[in-house]
Structure formats: structure tokens, C-alpha cells
Amino acid sequence: MPGWGTGRGGGLASWRNPTDIMIFETTGIGKRYTRGMAKRSQDRVLRGKTTGTRSRQSATGTMLPDARRSPRFAGIPTFCRYPRIEDVEARGQALDWAIYGVPYDGGVTYRPGARFGPRAIRVESQYVKRYSIEYDVDVTEVLSIADAGDAPVAPYSAEGNARVQAEFCRGVQERHPGVRLLAVGGDHTVAYANLLATHERFGAGQGLALVHFDSHLDTVDAVWDERWGHASVFRRAIEAGTVDPQAMLSIGIKGPLNSRDDLAFARDRGVTVLTAEQFRAGGKVAVRAFLKRMGRRPVYVTFDIDCVDPAFAPGTGTPSVGGLTSSEALQAIRSLGGIDLAGADVVEVLPDRDVAGITSLMAAHVIFELLCLSAIRR
Ligand SMILES: [Mn+2]
């Protein structure tokens, strides 16, 4: 399929890792765009007319191994084969997105094991390619993306973990002003620190707008007298002011719940809730209405893999029957096209309950679709 973005894009550069010598291709903006919205967006960047909260850094693309020369099954796995942050820094290149793992699952209310999520998702993500047919965009041409490794963790303390994770985020932000952070969990508590760091950079004096994919609202006050579990993360974020509840949309919520009262906090604070049933019955219209109301505000997206039905994503600790299909989930993310994505996370993958890596593979493609949302804004 010539011309579909799978050929070699530019000059070759070599890069060494401890086990292999790989041949990388350098793709940069200004080389291969020819069509549509992406072309117009690229021209805008080249002219320096970026707007809103977007990074003023010039994206210079992502160094990616050429899969037709360096097999996807060889080498040490990074997220989607993106370069390690150390290598980006050694080149003195600006960074648009840092993807990092948070191998922490001390905040779960049911089945543990999501601490192994980042590792499993890195492995399955080797088969994530770089060109989106749906958007006609090659994320590696438009964005400078790196795998920033795993954040340090405090395995016995969700609150302590949030603290060390936030420090890690600030370190990356200091080295790369304007970088956006994509956290890969781990359980949903890892969203807290990533939201905090994103809010510090992009909040502009108000809570972030949040699109929240999940089976559960995660607004419980406390579980077993503990206020820092994965069922409480958005209650804590709203209390801290990092999330504006009236600019929060939860997609994929479903029952049964522990009680009728479980909905009260979200309702009282003005969270917009689209149950899985409601999303299926025309949710894209509701999503559009929400985004219209958000205007030009930067948006954070948090994606709990348990919003996807266990038939498609069995590897998760609190599975909930009747969720989105993997196809519906991708469509739901694409329905956000046009947002200014300020930060994101993909959480709650539990590899030990997975089958043939399908949940990790789904999570890896969610990462890609989120990066596409950012790429098409360029
Ligand atoms: Mn959750």
C-alpha cells in the first residue's frame, strides 16, 4: 500500500542499546504531510502561530525504529517503541509527551496485580504502529514522544506514592518545559499525581476539564477508613481543586453499585455522567455538547480499562459486565477529536488476569489514540 505512511520517512540514524544496534528513521514535521487538517495544523506550527496552552517548543518528531528493518519482536521494549527519555535528552531534543509507568496497585479495592501493568503494556505495545488512517496523521512526524521509564513508587502507601510520583512528574517538567504527561498504571490512584502536575502547568487558575472513562465513578469518600484508594481518586482531585467537577464527564459508568448514594457526590457537584447504556444510545451527541461547553479549555483524559467489557479486556481488577466493546471505546476517544489534551492516563490493567495480552494490547492502542488527539491539534 504505497503512500500509506509505512515506508521510510527520512534520514537514517543509528542508535545503540545494550543488546542490539537498531536502525532508526528520523521523521520530522515538514517532510511528509500532504493532506487535510494535519497539513493545515502543521503549517500553523511552522509559522509559529500556536495557540492556547500548547507547548511553544517546536516538535521535531520522534525517532522510531523502522519495523521493516528492526523487527518489533527484538530489543528492549519501550512504550510503542518510542525512544527512552535519556536518548531524547542526549540529543537535546524538545519533548511534547513523556509516557511513563507507575507500577503501583496498593489502592485497589478488589483484585491486586495492576503494578505489573506498565511492563505488560510495554510488551504488547510493540505492535502499535504510528500512522492513523482515521486521522491521516503519523504521530511520530508531529510529536516528540518519549518513554520516561517508571516513576518511583511507595508500594505501601497510596498517599506516599502520589507524593513520589508528583516529584517525578515535576522533574520531567523542569527538564522539558511544556511537556505533557501520560501515566500508565498501576491502579487508578496514579491519576491523582498526574492530574496534580498537569494542573500546575495547564490549569490556568481553575480546575482541569476531565473526560473520565470508567465503569465506576471513583468518588467514594473512603473505603475501609482509607481515603486514598482507587475508588476515591476523583473525590480527592475535586477537593484539591485540580479537577473542576462541572467540567467533568464520566463515560461508561454502570451498575450495580454498592448503594444509590454512590451517585450522590457526582450529582451534587455537577459531574456529567454518561452510563455505558447512554453512551451506546447516542453518547457522541452528548460528548459533543460537553466539549462545546468546554470551549478552548485544556482537557485531561483518564482511561480506566474497566470501562471496556471484560469480554474484550478481562485483565483488570474490578471487572464490570456490560461495558464498551473495544471498537466503541476507540470511537469514544475519537469523538473527542479537537480537544487540547493537556495530560492523560491509562490505568487498571492487571496482566495476571489477562488472556493472550488482549487487555494490554487494548491499553497500548488507547495510548496511541490519545496521542492522535494531540497530534491532530498540531
Ligand atoms: Mn477507576
Image (cartoon, rainbow, N blue to C red):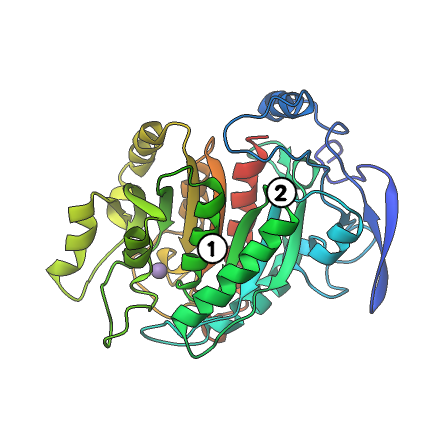
320 left or right of 91 in image? left
Q: Is residue 178 left or right of residue 214?
A: right
The residues bearing labels 1 and 2 have C-alpha atoms spaced at a distance of 15 Å
Name the residue rendered at 57%, 68% in the picture: 120
Query: Mark 1 — residue?
Result: 194
The reply to whether the residue tagged 2 has its Cβ within 8 angstroms of ligand 1 is: no
| Residue 164, position as x, y percentages in the image | 50, 67
Query: Which quadrant is the N terminus positioned in?
Result: top right
Q: Give the image quadrant in which the ligand numbered 1 is located.
A: bottom left
Residue 356 visible somewhere in the drawing: yes
Q: Can I make out residue 351 in this image?
A: no
Amino acid at pointer 1: Asn
Direction left: furthest residue: 260
- Residue with the mark numbered 2: 96
Q: Check residue 336 in the rendering and tell me which mark sits there, or answer none.
A: none
Relative image position of residue 378 (x, y in whole percent):
59, 30
- Above or below, 31 relative to 271: above
